[in-house]
Image (tube, helix red, strand yellow):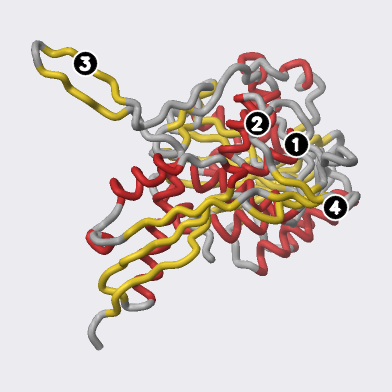
Amino acid sequence: MTRVSPYTECKLQVTSINIYYIKSPMHEWALAEGVISTATGFAEENNLKEVTEVVVMIGELQQVEHDVLEFAFQQLKTPLFKNAEFILKSQPAKFKCRNCGNEWSFKAQGLTEDISEAIHFVPEMAHVYIKCTQCESPDFEVTEGRGVWLATITGVKKDE
Amino acid sequence: MSDPRLAIIEKRFEKVGKIIAVSSGKGGVGKSMVATSLALSLKEKGYNVGLLDLDFTSPATHVILGVEGLYPEEEYGIIPPVAHGLKYMSITYYSLDEPVPLRGVDVSNAIIELLAITRWEQLDYLIIDMPPGISDATLDTIRLIPEIEFLIITIPSKVAFQSVRRLLILLKNLKMPIKGVIENMVMKQSKYIKDEVDRLNLTYVGGINYDENLEATLGNVEKLSVTEFYNSVTEMIPYIE
């Protein structure tokens, strides 16, 4: 279960020409599709002719790779987003135990690669592998920093 | 703030023909066995079939199929691995056999995540093994999955059918399509369930006799496919097609 960055450049020697290609994109692509689709819907509803800025919050728990998401935005963007700046902001993940009230922060360090990946795909798997640091209960709330959220969209309105 | 996953779920089902949720008001009535057998039987008929196990707290289809060592590929989302000819998706790829203690909001979030990132592509049928009851998973599938249809499983017990009836009434009130009701684990002939289903103006698909040989087939699809149970499910396919 090794994750491969789409940015990994693989070099093929063909006579004297070096050909670079990008390995298949990861599941961040699916999340990026969701952001573009939601932002497009918002732009249509609000009569925007152009989107200038999209702010996306990225919860630390899902361990989304910012460069992969940024790459996906650039590949998926339609003319509506031609001049748009995609701003990715990290949000630390915080937990609150429902059993004892303890609050603590997520630390990816120390998780095995398999567990880290399970939480990456489905953040609720945190309840399978992470326990309250005080009472060891799996019954905790992810109070902040779960996954990918669309925070704000800025654009230019069509002429009335 | 907006959840970007909701906008792409419908797109994930664009190339899927029919989506059938195998549901019940009660647990332990054989939903997973019916869902798995139905998926395998449709595949045998030549259809391209997917099987999605949405019972996060008590997943069972991987045990019935004997799935081991599979893991979804990551490509523009995730691609369900193929198990016995079925595109097969289950939370157990990520939870292994550990307990999955999720509250309602977490169940919803996990369902949304899986529906948003799983790329089924071209399918004639997607069979969904649902958790029992009328809470988060049922409400989310109704809310999120376009053109979903329900196949309801009950056992002959009057107690079990009381819960099943509540599910049927909920689905009817929401105007959700119901393919019919299957009466599983029949041990002696009775018209009780059929009469109750008729009274609701729904289709009684048929009864499946209790098959004492079924337990011994778990994990072995070849053995499952020659059971009386499997044959009964196969005979019900005209109600599903």
| Kind of residue at badge 3 | Leu
| Above or below for A13 versus B35 | above
| Kind of residue at badge 4 | Arg
Residues at badges 3 and 4 in contact (C-beta under 8 Å)? no
In the rendered view of the protein, which quadrant contains the C terminus of chain A? Answer: bottom left
What label does residue A130 carry, if any?
1
Write down the quadrant of residue A35 in the picture. bottom left
Front one among B40 and A4: A4
What label does residue A98 carry, if any?
4
How far is the residue under mark 3 from the one under mark 4? 54 Å
- Drawn side of residue A14 relative to residue B80, left or right: left
Viewer-nearest of discs 2 and 1: 2
Residues at badges 3 and 1 in contact (C-beta under 8 Å)? no
Q: Residues within 10 Å of mark 3 (few under 14, many from 20)?
A: few
How far is the residue under mark 4 from the one under mark 1? 14 Å
- Chain-order first, disc 4 or disc 1: 4
Same chain letter for marks 3 and 4: yes
- Drawn side of residue A26 relative to residue B208, left or right: left
Task: Find disc 2 in the rendering and name its residue.
Answer: A109
What label does residue A14 carry, if any?
none
